[in-house]
Image (cartoon, rainbow, N blue to C red):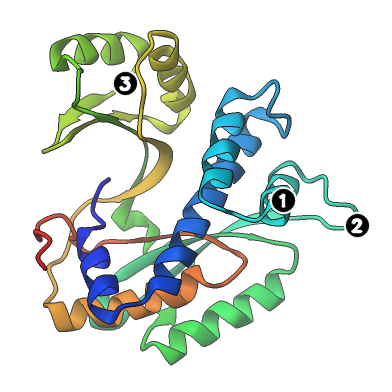
Amino acid sequence: MSGHSKWHNIQRRKGKQDAIRGQLFTKLSKDIYQAAREGGGNPDTNFRLKVAIERAKANNLPAENISRTIAKATGTLEGVTYEELLYEGYGPHGVALLIEIVTDNRNRTAAEVRHIFRKRGGSLAESGAVAWMFKRQGQIEISKAGVDGDELMMLALEAGAEDVIEQENAFVVATAPEDFKQVRVALEEAGVKYEEAELVYEPATKIELSDEALEEVYELVESLEACDDVQTVWTNVNMDDEEETD
């Protein structure tokens, strides 16, 4: 869930502030998209969307981006029909990738993504070649501050969660995809505040890479995330074990 420290370290070494800002915008847009997709495009009746929009505005995401993302999620952009796709591929060093796509032109998107893979030493794969390595799962991340782990465990399991995983600074509530919404709503109604709540693709096993190899994979992921039609990129790289250093 919180396996982004290595990405962060690479970004910091390269000094790519624009890339960091771009990835923040991608994440904010993804939060808005998922909220609108699940509960509709009206923030007055969709609390999760309201919170996502407020967070986006606080981080200076342009209003045009917010409106376009909601339109994509709800299918209300006049004259345009969007579809959701899942691309599968291999990156450098045999890394497996799943790419969530939202596009109004699958031929254009396929060409763009294929070009990025070729440029960065990877390749698109046939449907099913990579997806079996990942499990679809709901994950809700809750800061440990002021939270009783035992009480959270009882509340989450009663609401239908599969497990509550303790990490260094957070608890992660894991759910089946079909139970994600009801568990999240139950936590909200109980007054539990969460840092992140999303459906993820969790790899069954993770591979270790050297720093040099990881940078190659990072370049591919960064290029894919820069594509307007790409919502999220998932990999089976282990990014959880590196401490940040100056």
> Do the residues under discs 2 and 3 have CB atoms within 8 angstroms?
no
Residue at 53 percent across and 82 percent down: it is 114
What SS does tag 2 mark?
loop
Q: Which residue lies under the disc numbered 1?
A: 72
Which residue type does callout 1 highlight? Lys
Front residue of 66/199: it is: 66
What SS does tag 1 mark?
helix
Q: Earlier in the sequence, mark 3 or mark 1?
A: 1
Q: Is residue 79 above or below residue 170?
A: below
Closer mark to the observer between disc 2 and disc 3:
2
Residue at 28 percent across and 83 percent down: it is 216
**Disc on res. 161:** 3
- Does the rendering let one see residue 126? no
Neighbour tally class for label 3: few under 14, some 14-19, many 20 plus, Cα within 10 Å: many
Distance from Cα at disc 2 to Cα at disc 1: 12 Å
Which residue type does callout 2 highlight? Gly
Distance from Cα at disc 3 to Cα at disc 1: 30 Å
Q: Is residue 179 left or right of residue 58?
A: left
The percent position of residue 160, horizontal first and vertical second, equals 35, 16
- Does the rendering let one see residue 136? yes
Residue at 20 percent across and 33 percent down: it is 170
Q: Disc count in the image?
A: 3
